[in-house]
Amino acid sequence: MYCPNCGANSRDGAPFCENCGAPLQTYNGNPNMNYSNNMNYNQGYQQQPFMVSKEVEKSFTTLLILCVLELACCNQLFGGIALIFAILGKNALSNGDIAKYEKNTKTAKTILIVGLILSLVCGVLYTGFFGFSILAEL
C-alpha cells in the first residue's frame, strides 16, 4: 500500500504511514468515514539542520574569550552577565533563531564595553587617589 501523502510504501493493513504518519485506511472500513484530512503529515520531518557560518562561529568564539577575560581580569559582575547573554545567544543560534542570537550577542557586547569602561574609570580613580596620597607623604 502506498501513502497518498508522501508516496512511501507501507505494509498492507497499516493504519498509518510509517514514513510520515498520515492515515492510510478509512475508519472501520467505512468509506464515508475517511479521516484523512489532506494535512501534510511529514511537515518538519525533512527539515535540514541549521548550519552556522565560520564567520559567526569565529565572532562567537571571540565574544566568549572577551567575556572570560573580563570575568577573570576586570569586572566579574559585568563579565558574568555578558557571558550569560553570549550563551543565550548561542542557544538561540542553535535553534535557528537568528534575530534572538543577534539581540543577545549585541547585549553581551554592550555589557562588555560598559564593564570595561567602568573598570578603567575605577582603576584611574583608584590609582589617582592612592597616587596623590603617596606623593603627599613625600
Image (spheres, helix red, strand yellow):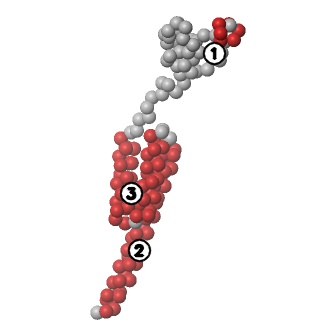
Vertical side of 47 occupied by 12: above or below? above
Q: CA distance from mark 3 to mark 1?
A: 54 Å
From the viewer's perspective, tell me whether residue 4 is left or right of residue 136: right
Mark-to-mark CA distance, 2 and 3 = 19 Å
Residue depicted at x 37% and y 44%: 57
* Residue 83 x, y percent position in the rendering: 42, 55
Point out which mark residue 122 bears: 2
Label 2 amino acid? Cys
Instruction: Categorize mark 1 by other alpha carbons within 10 Å: few (<14), some (14-19), many (20+).
Output: some
Quadrant location of the C terminus? bottom left
Question: Are the residues tagged 3 and 1 within 8 Å (C-beta)?
Answer: no
Of residues 47 and 2, the one drawn nearer to the viewer in this rendering: 2
Q: Position of residue 87 (x, y in %)?
A: 43, 49
Mark 2, secondary structure of its residue: helix
Q: Check residue 67 in the rendering and tell me which mark sits there, or answer none.
A: 3
Q: Residue at x 44, y 40 (%)?
A: 94
**On screen, 92 above or below 8?**
below
Neighbourhood count class around disc 3 (C-alpha, 10 Å): few under 14, some 14–19, many 20 upward: many
Report the side of 59 relative to 107 (left or right): left
Name the residue nearer the viewer: 69 or 120: 69
Label 1: which secondary element: loop
